[in-house]
Image: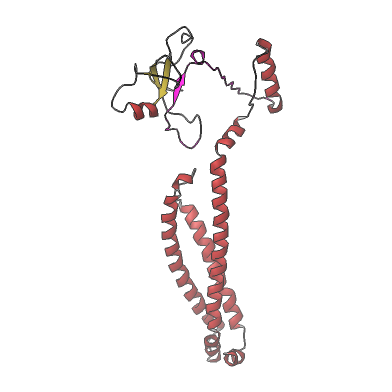
Amino acid sequence: MSLVKGRLLDDFDTEMAPPVAVINESMARTYWPNDDPLGKRLKLTTRATEWATIVGIVADARTESLATSSVPHLYASLYQREGKHLAIFLRGRLETAAVGRAVRDHVQALNSALPVFGVRTLDETLSASLAVRRLSMELIALFAATALLLAALGIYGVISYMVGERTHEIGVRLALGARPSDVMGIVMQQGIRLTLVGAALGLAGSLIASRAMASLLVGVTPTDPLTFLAAAIVLAIVAMAGCYFPARRAIRVDPIVALKAS
């Protein structure tokens, strides 16, 4: 912890010494916004009979979750608390499977009555802290993929239908000497115009929706340009495919057959 003001807990803060506590910057801002917290007194628990004195302020840190560090925290001396729950942190090149057993053997060599439990690696701890957000993002990703698929099918179906309705017009143009490339260009231009209008409306709606989901995003901004660009490109490709393939089928039809079919 980075000390901001006052002092940290030390070896002299024992059961025989007056209770003390250290708070973080968020707690200082929340409960003493216009005052100096150092020297203030509080009770560490609802059942405490003695008042603890605040002796230091430390910088905010992500100790409970990676989501935010701006959460009020209070730190007390292990030796001044009734229930002594100690966490041991190990760093180095360790064999993960053997760490728990080795630590348990060392601790219980000092006192066989001490229980040792809850052995986890840092990766497991980080993964657990992000479990709720991960589930939320997986559900959102599933819904987004479903929405993208439905949008793609809808775009393809609508534009294919529009091109199919113009089969008679395409037959007339071909009968009057229009080149297939010219007809293809007309159909693609119409599809591009519709795609641009739809993309503009979709991007505007996405910007509004993304701000409402900002609290669920980690490591990306609500207006991340790459995300919007990727979605727009995918839907544009689908729209162009919806124009190209039906138009290609239409210009391959014999003009006489197309005119008779109409």
Image location of residue 160, percent across then percent down? 56, 76
Displayed quadrant of residue 200: bottom left
Displayed quadrant of residue 29: top left
170 w.r.t. 102: above or below: below
Q: Is residue 93 magenta?
A: yes
**In front of the other: 24 or 222:** 24
Q: Main secondary structure of the magenta part?
A: loop
Question: Which range of residues does the magenta coloring cover?
Answer: 65-94
Image location of residue 84, percent across then percent down? 55, 17
Residue drawn 58% across the image and 62% down it: 149
**In front of the other: 237 or 64:** 64
Image location of residue 251, percent across then percent down? 58, 83
Drawn side of residue 254 relative to residue 239, left or right: right
Drawn side of residue 197 relative to residue 252, left or right: left
Displayed quadrant of residue 237: bottom right
Q: Is residue 149 magenta?
A: no
Image location of residue 48, percent across then percent down? 45, 17
215 w.r.t. 27: above or below: below
Residue drawn 61% across the image and 33% down it: 124
